[in-house]
Amino acid sequence: MNKLANYLEGRWQEGAGAGSPVLDPVTGETLATVGADGIDMAAAYAFARNQGGTALRALSYAQRAELLGAIVKVLQANRDKYFDISLKNSGTVQNDSAVDVDGGIYTLSYYAKLGGKLTAGQLMADGTADALARDNAFATQHILVPVRGLALFINAFNFPSWGLWEKAAAALLSGVPVVIKPASATAWLTHEMVKDVIDAGILPGGALNIVCGRPANMLEALDSLDVVSFTGSADTAASLRNHPKIKLEGVRFNAETDSVNSALLGPDADDDAMGLLVREVVRELTIKSGQKCTAIRRILVPQARYATVAAALADKLKGITVGDPRLEGIRMGSLVSASQRDAIVAGIQKLEACSDIVFDGRQDIKIQAEGNQHAIVPPVVFGTQNPDTHPLVHEMEVFGPVATLMPYRDTDHALALARRGMGSLVASVYSNDPDFLAQAAISLAESHGRVHLINNDVAKVHTGHGNVMPQSNHGGPGRAGGGEELGGLRALRFYHRLSAVQGAPGVLEKIVN
Ligand code: NAP
């Protein structure tokens, strides 16, 4: 049995006891176990801060960017192995595994390039100096310096590769040591990647650490100058926010949580725009079996287009092959675990009780897999004629291949329905009317971390509703967690402290230069 050890204090440490199993969601086979019983998190954190943090901060941004580049090479060399682990542990087909594996590598290489262009120094200037006295005799200059604590990442099960590297890229580039706690269900891939990078001897000791399972004192052992970046459900985020370390002692906390994202077909709705929306909805429902925080959950269309869109979605979805990702020709694989399957089945039943059916893969798609113990669930699209009074559709995220189609009366109604998500990661808008696209973007920006505008001009080149690109902000207000990640150099701010330095202009110049 592959017992996944924890890499802390510069050495591999197994948790005591049997640990909990990491399973193949299609065959049910136990692939590994994870556990952190008996692990001393206080000692692990002290090592990360003192050894890892000190060594990383002694390097310039450009030198740390070179380290990211070296990590990219190690991960690229082991890509095939990561695809194999994804297939077994996440139940994903090759294309879906690529979103995670290659998405992680791409994000790291983007930050390696971006960091290479940063100053050779050890801090970042935030704007220029402002005078505080007559004749500029005394001035203020804001600077950003790397956090001296550590960055703890508590990650979700759906992106074991990308979820690690999209955060670690910005933290390591900033000079902040990382402790990753992957979700237990899919910890194997994160573990293997960390192990390969450690074995390659790229990073200073203590810079990259991993703890699997549920270690005791994971939050208690933090100190006030550490930072935590959490990705997962809103419920877990709420309980972590209430932890005294975060609530009372000021540990900086970023949360990326659930989101009922929408896709909106403009009121002009020519056939091209409708085709673009339908293609994207089908893609979002089926990639990673809909287990993407950014996936489309609500489809808003003009009343007059409701029946046509419903028919087009049903027509495309009935041709999707769903089953064991090992089989030739399968387009959509499994959910990551039996417990996720049970949660999604329960969510489908709740929506079904108060919605119409637009497409029901449970009836219209034959799952290609052995037995019925697997965690494979085919796509289901619900519909409603009463989007204003529907009891669940704007609140409940069913984290699988599930979405709901709804009609709107006019532009104001459409935008108001999108806002009913109470803060979302992304909304995409499909129209060939540039004025409408601009109006929608300005209106939706306030409640959405990203607005994705699609017309014929970008039909072949756009990056996709659900794809998170490192150049763009990822995160959303309100129920999406209120967090911010990526967005180019903006990502580095979370791993820096802002300080206003006041003094003689000559001294301030010395600091910045
Ligand atoms: P989850 O149950 O909240 O778990 C997330 C992480 O928190 C896991 O590592 C989990 O560990 C850990 N955890 C759970 N309870 C904890 C506690 N009391 N103390 C410390 N750690 C705890 O979420 P999930 O089911 O893995 O992920 C699915 C959700 O994540 C979806 O709602 C999805 O929308 C959201 N998500 C959001 C984003 C985004 O960027 N906004 C991205 C991906 C997913 P164990 O695995 O060991 O339980």
Image (cartoon, rainbow, N blue to C red):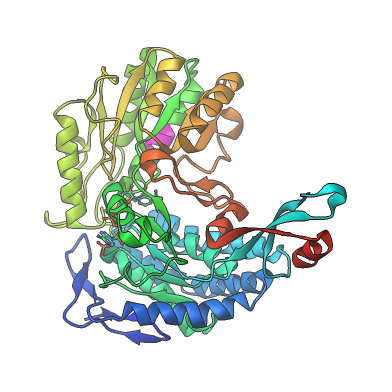
Evaluate whether residue 87 shows in this view.
yes
Q: Residue at x 39, y 39 (%)?
A: 478
Compared with 30, 134 (above or below) is above
Q: For this view, does 37 lie left or right of residue 201? A: left
Residue 149: x and y, percent? 49, 70
Q: Nearer the viewer, residue 150 or 465?
A: 150
Magenta stretch contains residue 122: no
How many marks do you count on the picture?
Answer: 0
- Compared across the picture, whether 252 is left or right of 218 comes to right
What is the quadrant of the N terminus in the image?
A: bottom left
Locate the C terminus and report the quarter of the image it occupies: bottom right
Location of residue 479 with respect to 266 vertically, above or below: below
Task: Name the residue located 38 percent from the left edge and 43 percent from the top edge.
Answer: 480
Instruction: Classify the position of ligand 1 by quadrant: top left, top right, bottom left or bottom right.
Output: bottom left
Query: Looking at this rendering, what residue extends furthest in the front direction?
Result: 134
Magenta segment range? 278-282
Picture residue at 54% right of the left edge, 73% below the top: 71
- Is 85 on the left or on the right of 497, as rendered? left
Nearer to the camera, 15 or 73: 15
What main secondary structure does the magenta stretch of the protein show?
helix
Q: Quadrant of residue 181?
A: bottom left
Give the image location of residue 174, x and y in percent.
58, 66
Q: Is residue 380 left or right of residue 495?
A: left
